[in-house]
Image (cartoon, grey):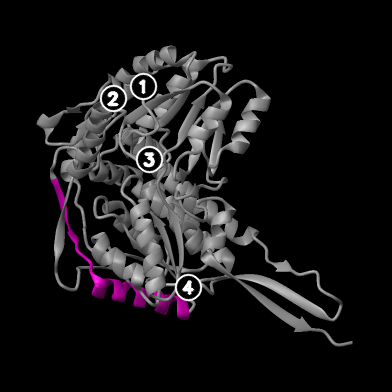
Amino acid sequence: MNSPDTDWHARALALRIDGRAVIDGERRDALAGETFACHSPIDGRRLAAVARCREADVDRAVASARAAFDDGRWARKAPAERKKILQRFGEKILAAREELALLETLDMGKPIRYSLAVDVPSTARTITWYAEAIDKVYDEIAPTGRHALALITREPMGVIGAIVPWNYPMIMAAWKLGPALATGNSVVIKPSEKSPLTALRLAELALDAGLPPGVFNAVPGYGHEAGEALALHMDVDAIGFTGSTRVGRKMLEYAGRSNLKRVFNELGGKSAFIVFPDHQDPALAACTVAASLYFNQGESCNAPSRVLVHESIADDFVAAVRAEMPKYAPADPLDAGSVMGALVDEGQMNTVLGFIASAETEGAVCAAGGRQVRAETGGYYVEPTLFDQVSPQMRIAREEIFGPVLSVLRFSTEAEAVALANASPYGLQASVWSHDINRAHRVARALRAGTVHVNQYDEDDITVPFGGYKQSGNGRDKSLHALDKYTELKTTWLRIDD
């Protein structure tokens, strides 16, 4: 395990980063020889030149994945063999934990303590959990008459395109890779151009673990170049996408323009966190929402950015949240004690500051925070921010911010709270805080969200599905339900003669 005395700055200076793509089992430059510079949001340092893959590179990666699928070097392996290789993949991830954590922190700005304690272990657990599932998921026999035998079997789709975001690069990649590889598919992953480094390293570790060449390819590049080419490709059978709702719409459009490939979108959120006056410990609710919202700098699709608080306790609740906020002061992500790091890049920082400015213009009360800090470092840091007296019409109450900005809206009745919570185009997660068991169940049932937490937030495990209602996406990541996204159901009907 990591020592708290580790000099992460020295480790960063010694790190040698390979930004080339991984195609057909080898590191490769982009065919055109182009690269783009990868900079750290911590202080603006240049990390690496990364291959700028375009359509020709995607074609090469997809051809490699298709050849690997068609000749059965992975898909036709016995489930127990695939299981062992994926288990070794998980072990390789844990063995490289410090390198992977450092890459993740340098690339997207999250504190090293969380890259080590959350991102790397969660990535490894996802891969090994799906490895364990491979030989424990059975097919079916339909209840037909005595003259027939109808077998219902799951088969791998073929070539899966995985397009993953920059906020949890490793974890989001694993959520696609785990079920897709476990079921026998080949994968081409396009990581975000804002955080491509760990996906490239994961592809190498998979090869080291024994995954055959061509089964897992990684093509870094820009979304409108490599990502679009992958989504439009006629030889890609499905796309697993995590990102913005705006780009998710494009994924569906690209499927319609190409081969009607399956598209599974995990998109944005504007999660509601509802606190009723009958909850016996509103201070715990305040502590929980601060920890959940400010974790990962607020760059989480499930961040509880809308806090709906009963008017009778709202003033005390706001004061309790404000008292928690000094804990989340932005600091150097390479300091093992830091709990809030940098936003992913200057563009995202300016977007967050724009939301803060609009809230002030529209009449919300900034109870704490609201400023850029640590500008002298060359990095992109924003204070944890708390707005009170927010109305449902304001931008910060309607739009996904993806930053450390929390909004408090007040309600007077249960019906009003439910209506406010559901008055969103998103439906990813929600939380209900009440010690009235009837109210907790009643409100949880009424909320249109993929996950409803009761008297907690963000407790999680690979065993439960993740996804949302409405414009938060379709399909589910995690759990056994994710296997449905990467398999086809086949019925084989046999006639049995007497």
Q: Quadrant of residue 142?
A: bottom right
The alpha-carbon separation of the residues under discs 1 and 2 comes to 8 Å
In the picture, the disc for residue 158 is 4
In the picture, the disc for residue 389 is 1
Q: Secondary structure at mark 1?
A: loop
Q: Amino acid at mark 2?
A: Gly
Q: Is residue 79 magenta?
A: no
The alpha-carbon separation of the residues under discs 4 and 2 comes to 53 Å
Give how far across and how far down residue 497 sits, in percent. 85, 87
In the picture, the disc for residue 229 is none
User: Label 4 neighbourhood size at 10 Å, few (<14), some (14-19), many (20+)?
Assistant: many
The alpha-carbon separation of the residues under discs 4 and 3 comes to 30 Å
Tell which of 214 and 340 is nearer to you: 340
The alpha-carbon separation of the residues under discs 1 and 4 comes to 52 Å
Q: Cβ–Cβ below 8 Å for labels 1 and 2?
A: yes
Q: Amino acid at mark 4?
A: Gly
Q: Earlier in the sequence, mark 1 or mark 2?
A: 2
The alpha-carbon separation of the residues under discs 2 and 3 comes to 26 Å
Q: Nearer the viewer, mark 4 or mark 2?
A: 2
Q: Earlier in the sequence, mark 3 or mark 1?
A: 3
User: Label 3 neighbourhood size at 10 Å, few (<14), some (14-19), many (20+)?
Assistant: many
In the picture, the disc for residue 363 is 2
Kindly identify which residue carries mark 3: 300
